[in-house]
Image (cartoon, coloured by chain):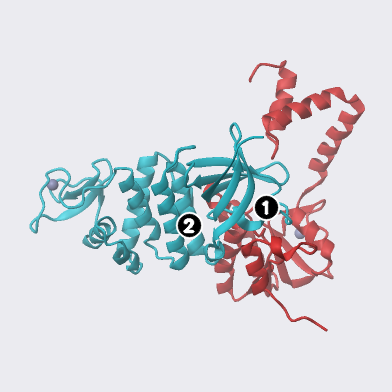
Amino acid sequence: MAGVYTPPVQTLIDELGRLPGVGPKSAQRIAFHLLKIPAADVERLASAIHEAKERVRFCERCFNVAEATLCPICSDERRDGTILCVVEESRDIVALERTGEFRGRYHVLLGCMNPLEGIGPEHLKIRELVDRLKGEPVEEIVICTNPNTEGEVTAMYLARLLTPLGLRVTRLASGLPVGGDLEYADELTLGRAFEGRRAVES
Amino acid sequence: MKELYRDEAVVLRTYRLRESDRIVVLLTKEHGKVRAVAHGVRKTNSKFGGRLEPMSHVLVQLRRGRELDTVTQVESVDRLGPMLSSLDRTSQGMAAIEAVEQLALDREPTPQLFRSTVGVLRTIAERPSSMNVPAFYWKLLAAEGLSPMLDACVRCEESGDGVEIVAFDLDEGGVLCRNCRSGVSLSPAALSLLRAVLGGRLNEALAAPESPATHEVGLLATRAMEHHLERRLKTIALFERH
Ligand SMILES: [Zn+2]
Ligand SMILES: [Zn+2]
């Protein structure tokens, strides 16, 4: 495929193709879309990327996206410092914050363990998590990694690492999606929802 | 209307594709290794739910495509829950399927490989013995026609009570006596475990409590498998380090 297009176009396609979830065909489609639309639109996109990259960085404490040394959650004194929620990515914090259920702080791993790809604990912000525990009054860690195999491996590894430190280590319960039908739930989800059952308040 | 087919399968690996889809690599019973797209599987309301995670043993319906097939239905055969109930089970299960993925051939049926894969996953779910994966690797290698010579020195062919077996050489494909030794050293306990695994006394080997000898056999099994595949096994390396 190399050399089919003039160098600037080919470079654009190559760069787009390096983005997550963008295959060669999509890269081509996006590239030609960008060439077709007004220059001002392209300018807006380019400056949005530039600005985000310049102004946004990772929080030094929890690795959430931040505009300062600390993210808004870490610098909020009203948050409960005794309970820490461990997530894979910053976008998981957004989802959890929308629930309004959690008043503690977070720690972002920036990924999850994937043994089949050779991605281990040293590729994640796990050492940084252990370091935080030395200086912060954390009593409970809630592991909120994704409910898939990689997320489970990460959760079990963290539990093995953190429980001996005398912390309460909990895992987000797996349950049934609200609005779904019981009969369509897979056995794993249904089994876990059963384990995590609770008393009905009346 | 493209051709639909049904088969029994073990999920060997998954790759993210676009927003919410995944490519799953399946070892099927009758169609060999198949790559297929599962649409919407990463959404929480997916009809596939948690049935297409690595190590899942399922019944699938697939629509044949040129390169990638498409998953249209999935039903569980064995529950995945036990495999994800401890780090030992998960790491053993992943180490097993990683080697299987390397050995399986695209669209070429290998019913024996399929049976052993289902078998080892069930064994791991039942009891996460530290010998599960080493024994599985040695059995896979034997099925590939690579049984190591264990009864006599592979170089001088001496055997019997007076011959002390002290080493194992992957290039030679067997054990060696003190005079001929090369490769890595091999303890008497590890030799007898190896003989149990490959000599029809598998249950005895699986019941062996974790010891320096089980570690020795494990390490040797990994090196032998890597030697055969000509690549490193990532899962084992990851859990050896931690
Ligand atoms: Zn922060
Ligand atoms: Zn010899």
Is residue A150 visible in the rendered image? The answer is no
The numbered mark at residue A110 is 1
**For the residue marked with disc 2, what is the amino acid?**
Gly
Occupied quadrant, residue B68 = top right
Measure the C-alpha gap from mark 1 to mark 2. Answer: 25 Å
Q: Position of residue B51 (x, y in %)?
A: 61, 56
Q: Is residue B155 visible?
A: yes
Q: Quadrant of residue A42?
A: top right
Q: Say which of A40 and B83 sits in front.
A: B83
Above or below, A10 against B42 in this view is: above
B198 w.r.t. B145: above or below: below
Q: Is residue B169 left or right of residue A121?
A: left
What residue sits 69% from the left and 39% below the top? A21
- The residue closer to the viewer here, A155 or B181, is A155
Q: Which mark is residue B93?
A: 2
Residue shown at 82% from the left, 51% from the top: A67
* Percent x, y of residue B10: 51, 51
In the rendered image, what is the letter of the chain coloured cyan?
A: B
Total tally of numbered discs in the picture: 2
Image colour for chain A is red
Q: Quadrant of residue A178?
A: bottom right
Q: Circle 1 sits in a helix, a strand or a loop, which is it?
A: loop
Few, some or many residues within 10 Å of mark 1 (<14, 14–19, 20+): some
**As drawn, is A172 to the left or to the right of B207?**
right
**Secondary structure of the residue carrying numbered label 2:** helix
| Mark drawn on residue B124 | none
The answer to whether residue B71 is left or right of residue B43 is left
**Disc 1 residue type (three-letter):** Leu
Mark 2 Cα within 10 Å, few/some/many (few <14, many 20+)?
many
Left or right: B192, with A33 as reference point: left
